Amino acid sequence: MLTQPSWVPLDDLTKRRIRFVWDDTRAMRDFAADASVVLRGSMKMSLRARLVLCAGLYEWNVWRFAGLHDRPEPLQISEVAWCATVDPRYMRYFDLMREEWLGPIQGPLWCAAMWLQPAMSNGHMFPRSVYEALSFLTRMALHVLPDREPFDSWLAAALDRLVEMYPLPPEEPFDDLFDRRVGQRLGPLIGRNVLDPEKAYDPSAGVNFLAHILREARATENPFLSSSEDLEDVGFVDEPYVLPI
């Protein structure tokens, strides 16, 4: 299971400071932050880099509330989100019951998961869903975090690194017309450690992380990971749960 990364500097005492406005009937209408910088930056990077950024932003929202609830789903979803950066089809469709996720802790977690899911699983077909998730997850983090300064610094560094290392490639409109090899056409694999602004990115460590998270999700029977049958139904032709060569 994932552990809280060093670039999310939230301790238990800080997490208990719930000082933001939350109304389950309003959700994002109370968000005041602007995500235009994130959207502009993401347009300059590869789709896989955008998915990695989505997974990273989702983690900020998940770790902000870690220890304040006993639900396993947020971290399970986060784990499979990283699997989906390898191939979006690894995240199966899910729908969390809204009435079971209410209040200033579980309400934001529900919203974050519901915006993340279409971006990670269908973003290769519907790019708008990725931009919508990037905007929502950024604005939510800025709304619920007790201190936005560490997040702002991290986000600026993450955007710069992803744009520099994984720029938007030339469009190939006739490449993989039937979505048989979705994962391979997203560009080079990108590990979670690319989001650590304090360290130079080690691609080999990133690949090792992705291989490990795929094994972990399968070994623990993560309910948000697509089964072999699910993958066969969507035309997955390669060996599943193995990194593409």
Image (cartoon, grey):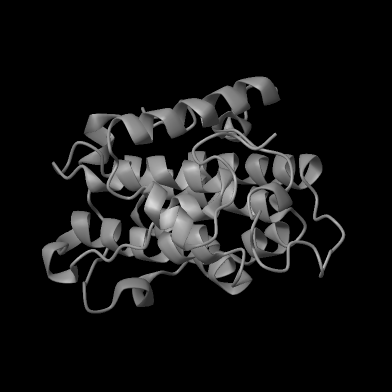
**Is residue 9 at all visible to an observer of this figure?**
yes
Residue at the spot 55% in from the left edge and 54% down from the top edge:
236
Instruction: Answer left or right for 232 relative to 96.
Output: right
- Decide which of 218, 233 is in the foreground and name it: 233
Nearer the observer, 19 or 46: 46
Q: Residue at x 59, y 40 (%)?
A: 153
If the image is split into quadrants, where does the C terminus sit?
top right
Place of residue 13 in the rendered image (x, y in percent of width and height, measured from the top left): 22, 32
Total count of labels: 0
Give residue 181's position: percent from left, percent from top. Answer: 66, 53
Position in image of residue 6 (x %, y %): 46, 25
Q: Is residue 55 left or right of residue 185?
A: left
Measuring 81% from the left and 70% from the top, which residue is drawn there? 173
Using residue 77 as the reference point, say whether residue 52 is left or right of it. right
Is residue 66 positioned above or below 127 on the image? above
In the figure, 44 relative to 173: above or below? above
Where is 166 relative to 172, above or below? above
Indicate whether 39 appears above or below 145.
below
Judge whether residue 10 can be spotted in this image: no
Residue 129 is situated, as x and y percent measured from the top left of the image, at 54, 70
Q: Quadrant of residue 1?
A: top left
Q: Looking at this view, is 180 or 167 the one in front?
A: 180
Q: Residue at x 32, y 64 (%)?
A: 111
| Nearer to me, 139 or 165 | 165
